[in-house]
Image (cartoon, grey):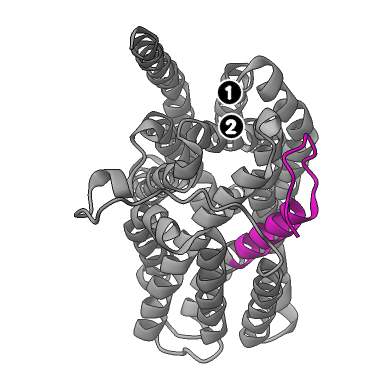
Amino acid sequence: MNYTNTSKIWTMPFFVALINNFFLFIVYYSLITILPVYVIRELKGSEVQAGLMMTIFMLSAILVRPFSGKIIDVLGKRKTLIVAELFFGLSTFLYLWVDDLYLLLALRFFHGIWFSIVTTVLIAIANDIVPDKRKGEGLGYFAMSMNLAVVVGPFIALTAVQFFPYQSLFLGLAVAIVIAFLGSFSIKVSENRPIIIERKPLSIHDLFEVRAIPIAIVGCLTAFSYSSIMSFISVYAEGEGVFEYVSLFFVVFASAMILVRPFTGRLYDRRGPNYVIYPSFIFFAIGLFVLSSMHSVTMLLIAGALIGMGYGSIVPCFQTLAIQSAEKHRSSHATSTFFTLFDSGMAAGAFVLGIISSYLGYSMLYIICGIIVVITIPVYKQLSSRKRKDERIVDSQREGA
């Protein structure tokens, strides 16, 4: 099946790519949720070793991410997807047999490599499939598959281990990736691979898309604040006596995100990104401030709705801006550049905010994160205005030539 350059978003290739992405992130978020418990309960590891399971995965993803664009240039998008998803699936199967802490750390590093590559190429493929005039809406729907997995993945993992052995969960996740892998053969895209005239040494240009760096910096700051949700919301809720409602927090988060997504996607395409990004920053910041003073289930759920509308709308916009900042054949480089900094923000946030929470507590932690989001607004304004100025200079030079 191939796609045609019409105004239609929901083509079969787009749907298959979206389901692929959804299954991939279900595996990712399921393992993030359950591996710390698995390490402590089953492998008798420490809390530090449990935390390393996330850190080592993110480290390998960050290290490999800059090379993902170059790999896609060499192999092409479709072949890269098939190879990366094959090894990602193999990695998932290996959890069935690894019962040693150090082997598990090695597996997490190996798994992170292929996660980095396959997520980069899937977004590049989605960018090729979505019509140019509907990029904001189409890529927003695609990004929503990742955000929905935030709810579905942990729910599946936490429910499964209550009734079945951990190996049953690992097997189920591996089967999901097998289904995604088989579906990847049906995706055909135009490659738009660059013409290589002569072999040159590897350069920064081969690893990063410079035009995507400004929005990637903003994404890094945003991810830093959001890491407080992924890393500490459960512990914070337990201390406030509402731990059993944390899963409902993510349900409300996802519901709010889904409700506003069609509106924000069309608003992005018709009025521009600023009409979505500035209000989303405000919702995100208010949600964090509400969370900082949370003493009841109601406040927890209100915070979930606000953060879902805010953060859930910001990230799809950032991904779209990163891709649109580059030439079409450089979309994979733009994606890898964005996620290199985004993943770095998540990893740094989990570490730094963990130290802050140990001294100041979780309530103050979320106040600080809300302030960081507010500070990010003028940073975005400055970087985006500078980018537009640079583009005008380039356009005037072209006209003069």
Q: Can residue 236 be seen in this view?
A: no
Residue 204: quarter of image: top left
Is 165 situated left or right of 372 in this image? right
- Regarding mark 1 in the picture, which secondary structure is present there? helix
Amino acid under label 2?
Cys
The magenta region covers 1-27
Q: Can residue 31 be seen in this view?
A: yes
Q: CA gap, disc 2 to disc 1?
A: 7 Å
Viewer-proximal residue among 104 and 136: 136
- Regarding mark 2 in the picture, which secondary structure is present there? helix
Which residue, given by chain and number where applicable, does mark 1 sit on? 277
Q: Where is residue 200 in the image (x, y as percent from the top left)?
A: 21, 53
Q: Position of residue 60 (x, y in %)?
A: 36, 64
Residue 6 belongs to magenta span: yes
Would you place residue 270 above or below residue 170 in this image?
Answer: above
Which residue, given by chain and number where applicable, does mark 2 sit on? 317
Q: Do the residues labelled 2 and 1 touch (CB within 8 Å)?
A: yes
Count of picture labels: 2
